[in-house]
Image: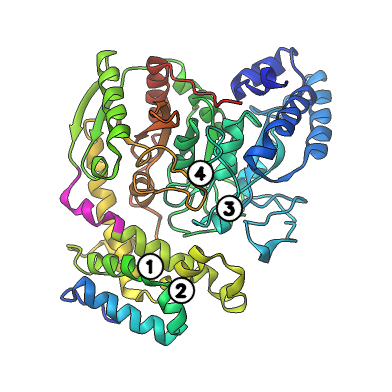
Amino acid sequence: MAVGLASLSAAEARAALRRRELSATGLVEALARRIEEREPHVLAWETLDLEGAYRQAQILDEELEDGCLRGPLHGLPVGVKDIFYTAGLPTRAGSPIYRDFVPAFDATAVRRLRRAGAIVLGKTATTQFAFADPAPTRNPWNLEHTPGGSSSGSAAAVAAGMVPAALGSQTGGSVLRPAAYCGIVGLKPTYGRIGRAGVFPVAWSMDHVGVLTRTVVDAALLLSALAGPEAGDPTAAAVPVPDYLAALENPRPPRIGLVRRLFQERTEPEAWAQLEATAQGLARAGAQVEEVEPAPEFDFLFDVYNIITAAEAAAYHAPTFAQRPDDYRPLLRAFIETGQLIPTTAYLQAQRARHHLARAALRLFDRWDVLLTSATTGPAPRGLESTGDPACNAPWSVFGFPALTLPIGLSGQGLPLGAQLVAAPWQEGRLLNAARWCELILEVSLVPPS
Amino acid sequence: MRLDPSLSIEEWRQLLRQEAVRTWGEQRAQALEEGLERTAIALHGVANFPLAGEEEPYLLGAQPFPYEEG
């Protein structure tokens, strides 16, 4: 069984590759064997390109032999959610409309991964157009439970050891929620930190590119390659990118603002109790933990979120939907039909309200390095008819703040639970530093049963 | 539809349902009940959001968010 190599984190594999203790081809072969074992059960992949990955690994091994290192991800296999354009590889977005679509170019995020030396192992399953109609993917912890969505395949593949890291995207909670359900780390950076060109949109003013990994260090490693401006992609913010790996070198106990209101009431008691116990544990270890109170207007958050996402999704899909409504799955179809009824003034007022709320939310960081709250409303729900509730993640997508899911333990049913850490805009370094400190203190590393 | 803050959630739901029937037909409108309810709540909330100030509309479209660089 290929569990040994397949269980390496991205950082461990990277180090082994650089020490020549491991080859990229050997790693691809190990992951291919792991996929052969687990994929029939988990169904995480839409398209696998193992031959292409092996060929690319050979090239990268030869380059490494010649002392050439393409970048920080040289020789590391990754999964790519199937809403990211990949040159020469099908990109279906879970839709029959794009069944035969093969892009001629890479999405910005994919291009940057390849430029950094990563190997695209394949495309991971997504809900249709990254909305709510479930993909066939199952949760590696319990195949009768959802892995979450919309980055279903990315989360499940990483958790099941089929690949050390994967690209995801989040409009409401599509990176952080599946990461929590599958017991891994999910990072959604600041809106615009990673370019979105070449990604099928859900709601363009709310869509974020994110990463799913098994450790905080791996999330920093991926972000190092992905963050920053990109020629030809105006969606990538021209904001300086710090050294995220250096930000992890000296993890310090953070000042943590625990956000109960809006979240506790939406979270199952068992999951909330686990979060409170985690907060207490972090405080005992030296973190400063106090409750923070969101402004009263935050009660409007979910109204703002619902109006903006529905209106933008309806607008984006309008031309295609008019031609092929029956090719849309039920939840997305209803979302588009409802979204097309929203008055223009409501959409614009929602955007104005969003700015007000975001400014008010910034004040939460006056005294705190990070905010802490539940990553999900509970463990992964049973059944594959739903991908779960994004309520705990949507606020940070509305604000565009960077947020990270950290595994904190298992529920009584043996399913993963996660905490959500949030930082101020562009403060991914601070977020990662705090998350790394928490990870070291908590010592929670979850591996699903085989 | 006018973004009228005096409308109740139920009035919004009825307005949306009428519009759904007109736009998509009775059969589809029935399939949208859950979404119409959610949207009625959201419209009621947005219509009553305490917006004040004059400068912020100029920020829309200028940049994603009014944040300073980190």
Label 1 residue SS: helix
Residue sitting at x 60%, y 43%: A153
Image position, residue A83 (x, y; %):
61, 53
Q: CA distance from mark 2 to mark 1?
A: 9 Å
Which stretch appears magenta?
Answer: A294-302
Q: Which mark is residue A337?
A: 2
Please name the predominant secondary structure of the magenta segment in the image.
Answer: helix
Query: Which circle, 2 or 4, is nearer the viewer?
Result: 4
Query: Which circle, 2 or 3, is nearer the viewer?
Result: 2
Front residue of A70/B36: it is B36
Residue sitting at x 29%, y 65%: B42
Q: Which mark is residue A146?
A: 4
Label 4 residue SS: loop
Q: Which mark is residue B35?
A: 1
Whether label 2 touches label 1, CB < 8 Å: yes
Whether label 1 touches label 4, CB < 8 Å: no
Residue sitting at x 67%, y 21%: A3
Q: CA distance from mark 3 to mark 1?
A: 34 Å
Q: CA distance from mark 1 to mark 4?
A: 22 Å
Image position, residue A290 (x, y; %):
19, 27
Front residue of B27/A225: it is B27
**Amino acid at the residue labelled 2:** Glu
Q: Is residue A424 left or right of residue A141?
A: left
Label 2 residue SS: helix
Q: Is residue A411 magenta?
A: no
Q: CA distance from mark 2 to mark 4?
A: 26 Å
Instruction: Locate residue A293: give its quadrant.
Output: top left
